[in-house]
Structure formats: C-alpha cells, structure tokens
Image: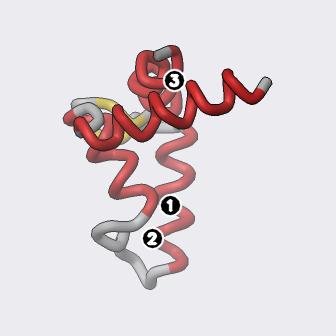
Amino acid sequence: VLAVGAAPVVLGAMGFTSAGIAASSIAAKMMSAAAIANGGGVAAGGLVATLQSAGAAGLSLSSNILLGLTGSSIGGWL
C-alpha cells in the first residue's frame, strides 16, 4: 500500500508532473540524456516517456496492482 501511495509523490519530486517535466529536475536531466542518446528525440514507450505519462495521468490499475503486490511481497519477505 505504501508503494502505491508513494509512487505519485516520488514521480512528482523527480520532476514528472501533470504540467510536464519540471525544469532543472532529475526528470529534465533524464530527458536530456535520452534525447542525446536517441539523436535529438525521446523515444515513445521509453523510460522517460513512461515515467512522464505516469506523472501526468497517474498510474494505471495494473501498475497499482503490481506495485502493491511487489511491496507486500517485499514486506512479507523482510
């Protein structure tokens, strides 16, 4: 449950916001590196695009379920 609740907060803190990627943020640095690596563009479906989508629209139901299962598995293992 904590992982599901923390994901939007962490994404926002990294600079992946509903208004776009925040200037001078970790997200901006990631986007710059991805653009340089891809010859000037950011690949659709890549890590930066996926994180920005989640930051803008929130996580999908399947992502929430996966995070919840992962968090509870790790919590149970510890």
Q: Is residue 19 left or right of residue 3?
A: left
Q: Is residue 7 left or right of residue 41?
A: right
Name the element at disc 3: helix
Count residues near mark 1 (Cα–Cα under 10 Å), then give few for <14, some for 14-19, many for 20+.
some
Q: What colour scheme governs how the chains and residues are painted in the rendered image of this protein? A: secondary structure
Which is more foreground, mark 2 or mark 3? 3
CA gap, disc 2 and disc 3: 29 Å
- Image x and y of residue 68, in percent: 45, 28
Which quadrant is the C terminus positioned in? Answer: top right
Name the element at disc 2: helix
- Image x and y of residue 29, in percent: 56, 51
Identify residue for label 3: 3
Count residues near mark 2 (Cα–Cα under 10 Å), then give few for <14, some for 14-19, many for 20+.
some
x 32%, y 35%: residue: 55
CA gap, disc 1 and disc 3: 27 Å
Amino acid carrying mark 1 in the image? Ser
- Image x and y of residue 8, in percent: 39, 25
Residue sitting farthest toward the front: 76
Answer with the quarter of the image where residue 62 lies: top left
Identify residue for label 2: 35
Contact (Cβ within 8 Å) of mark 1 with mark 2: yes
Identify residue for label 1: 32
x 52%, y 32%: residue: 14
Count residues near mark 3 (Cα–Cα under 10 Å), then give few for <14, some for 14-19, many for 20+.
some
Q: Is residue 11 above or below residue 31?
A: above
The numbered mark, 1 or 3, whose residue comes first in the sequence reads: 3
**For this rendering, which residue is in front, 63 or 40?**
63
